[in-house]
Amino acid sequence: MLLDRKYIEINNQPDESIPDISSLTVSIFQWNTLASSLSNPEAFPFVNSEFLTPQHRIPLILSEISKACIDSDFITLQEVDSTDLKQKFQAKFEEFEFRVSSAFKERGDGIVLAVNKSWEVLDSLVVRFQKNYVLDPIILKNYEFTKELDAETIEKLKETSQIALIQIVRKSGLTVCIVTTHLKAKAKFETIRTFQINHLIAIIESTTKQYDDCAVFLAGDLNSCLPFQRKIPVDPGMGVYESLLDRGYKNAYVSEREIAWTTWKRRNPPEGENKHTIDYMLYKKSVETEVTPKKILWLPYEGFIDSTNLPNAHFPSDHLSLSAVFELSKK
């Protein structure tokens, strides 16, 4: 049985303006599912090995995806193995009338963006961060960083295998951009992640400017914790979360996220326990379209998770899923 979670209403400030009749409710589900190839006793030595097997995990993942398909317009997933997508997840998405886009690293798992067929897809793009990374003219034109990169960091930027998916979709006269990504892991690589997210933001801006008016939703595992959770300080001008806020993005989970966590796992020393926020549900209004978060999926307190942390008997991933309901309206 899955962990039982409910939606929480968000107390927004009342809008005193006259509402436009052109409004739309949009629901997004986000989850790092934990790739089957990464679910093993070596990675999770304190978890009951039974809870790491495909026999235990896949039915729970399919149950979570089914619930998400019922409630959502868009579903974003990370750490999905291509075999699991083709043999298990694809049919579930098709059952609920979702179009599925995916992209995989050259060696490893990938990301998924599923869009309900009630939405018209106008454009679709795969971003592979490693190609022409440091000399990308979009980066050089739009962003200036205060840190001069050393040779080792430049080489790591060129070697990155991370990817992103971008889709422009339309429904009821409203156009939105849906983005998902899974940035480079490990705390010490915040500089690289900062370049990755700014690279992605630049491409989003370049893509959306072709449309008259386009709000943006960015959901994914950014592998970057909130500033107050960092154990390794970052240089001025660096930081994934700061970069997103500077470019006008807001966190749907801001009230919950500032005090909570999205992943909690225990590993052997020197890594030990990891408990922080690295998964996000972000949004950005456009010139003509207002975006207002209305509900978010509740995140459990520590007492709801057993001592071995995640994954466990009731949740098949080391990451919690996020879900938010938004109202889009013309200004």
Image: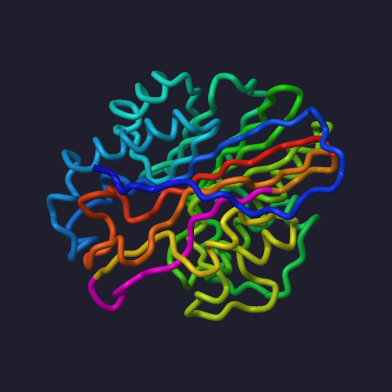
Residue located 54% across and 39% down the image: 28
Q: Position of residue 96 (x, y in %)?
A: 43, 21
Of 253 and 166, which appears nearest the observer? 253
In the image, residue 139 sits, relative to residue 60, either above or below, namely below
Quarter assignment of residue 1: top left
Measured as percent of width and height from the top left, residue 183 is found at: 51, 55
56 or 211: nearer the eye? 56
| Residue stretch rendered in magenta on the structure | 268-283
Residue 288 against residue 124 in the figure, above or below: below
Q: Is residue 147 left or right of residue 89?
A: right
Which residue is at a point 19% across and 50% down the rendered structure image? Answer: 52
Which image quarter is the C terminus in?
top right
Of 141 and 253, the residue lying toward us = 253
> Could you tell me residue 228's position as x and y percent?
55, 76
Q: Residue at x 37, y 41 (%)?
A: 80
Q: Is residue 272 magenta?
A: yes
Residue 22: percent from the left, percent from the top?
78, 28
Is residue 308 visible to us here?
yes
